[in-house]
Image (tube, rainbow, N blue to C red):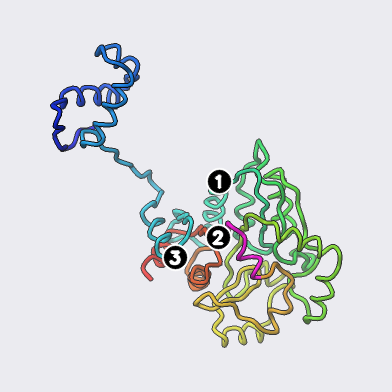
Amino acid sequence: MPLTPYTRPADGQVRLLTKVARMYHERGVRQADIATALNISQAKVSRLLKRAETVGIVRTIVTVAPGVYAELEEQLEDRYGLAEAVVVDVDPDADERELLASLGAGAAAYLEATLSGSDRIGVSSWSQTILAMVDRMRPFTVRGATEVVQLLGGIGAPEAQSHSNRILGELARTLGADPVYVQAPGVVADSAIRDSLLSDPSMQEVTRHWNELTMAIMGIGSIEPSDVLATSGNAFTDDERRSLLEQGAVGDICHRIFRADGSLVRGALDDRIIAITVENLLRIPRRVGIAGGERKLEAIHGALAGDWVTTLVTDLRSAEALAER
């Protein structure tokens, strides 16, 4: 470790401080062996090493590994009050498929490094980004969570149903967790049908699980639905989307629509959704939002502005754009 300018200790032990510091930091000599070589106690070696740091003989320099954007992540955390930002290195020329793959891999690595084993995790049902994450996770050798619960109705058109089932089922198997499915669609015809379904005992049990979640993993959607959501039967119609845009909508999380400032768009459409309530969602301690790309930028910014997420996983270009706002 190179030496840097320091403030001279008043006790005149500069030579000894330097010698001990070089032996320990540059040559890798153990403290006990330093004590023996210099005929001093190991406790004194420890004190000398601490003093060498205090006076500037030893300084710690963190070298950032390639592909890690620690400074940019800290900017996002400070700018938006996030607990954590995870910036994924994505080729600037990447297409939608490559972007999803990179975001999925980054989110998978984040979860593998941070899950405690005792989490009760809620997950959105129709997110292509979440599916990309699940496909890139390795099975845990010890239990990664106790249960995985759908946050949004997971029943849809047969050709798209496997998407929702894969997200929940494969994530639960990977983590060694118990799956909890929502046996209802995400959007129904009117509020009376929604109320009837929510009063069913099976949905009451799901609501109990929603109340006990410690973590949520969610895609951040734009108003224009993804291909899989559009084919699932759980997307809003063109006329409904036009109405939402007129009300200032920019994105959604679990079909809860929000504006650029993060405020919820309430009304008839919100009353037709079978999903965790906004109040319950925002009470979950750790809320991980995963999204990236220019198409999602306004939606991501709205989610951050409204404190919908506490952790953001996004791509480099989106992170740079968000930091500059």
Q: CA distance from mark 3 to mark 1?
A: 21 Å
Q: Residue at x 68, y 52 (%)?
A: 120
Q: Is residue 156 left or right of residue 171?
A: right
Tell me the chief SS of the magenta region: helix
Name the foreground residue: 191 vs 44.
44
Question: Quadrant location of the C terminus?
Answer: bottom left
Quarter of the view holding residue 193: bottom right
Residue named by callout 3 = 80
Residue 45 colored magenta? no
Residue named by callout 1 = 114
Q: CA distance from mark 1 to mark 2?
A: 15 Å
Q: Which residues are magenta?
A: 278-286
Q: CA distance from mark 3 to mark 2?
A: 15 Å
Residue named by callout 2 = 290
Task: Return the x and y of residue 135 as percentages of the image width and height.
Answer: 64, 50
Q: Nearer the viewer, mark 3 or mark 2?
A: 3
Packing grade of label 3 (10 A; few <14, some 14-19, many >=20) is: some
Sequence-wise, the earlier of marks 3 and 2 is: 3
Q: Is residue 99 left or right of residue 168?
A: left
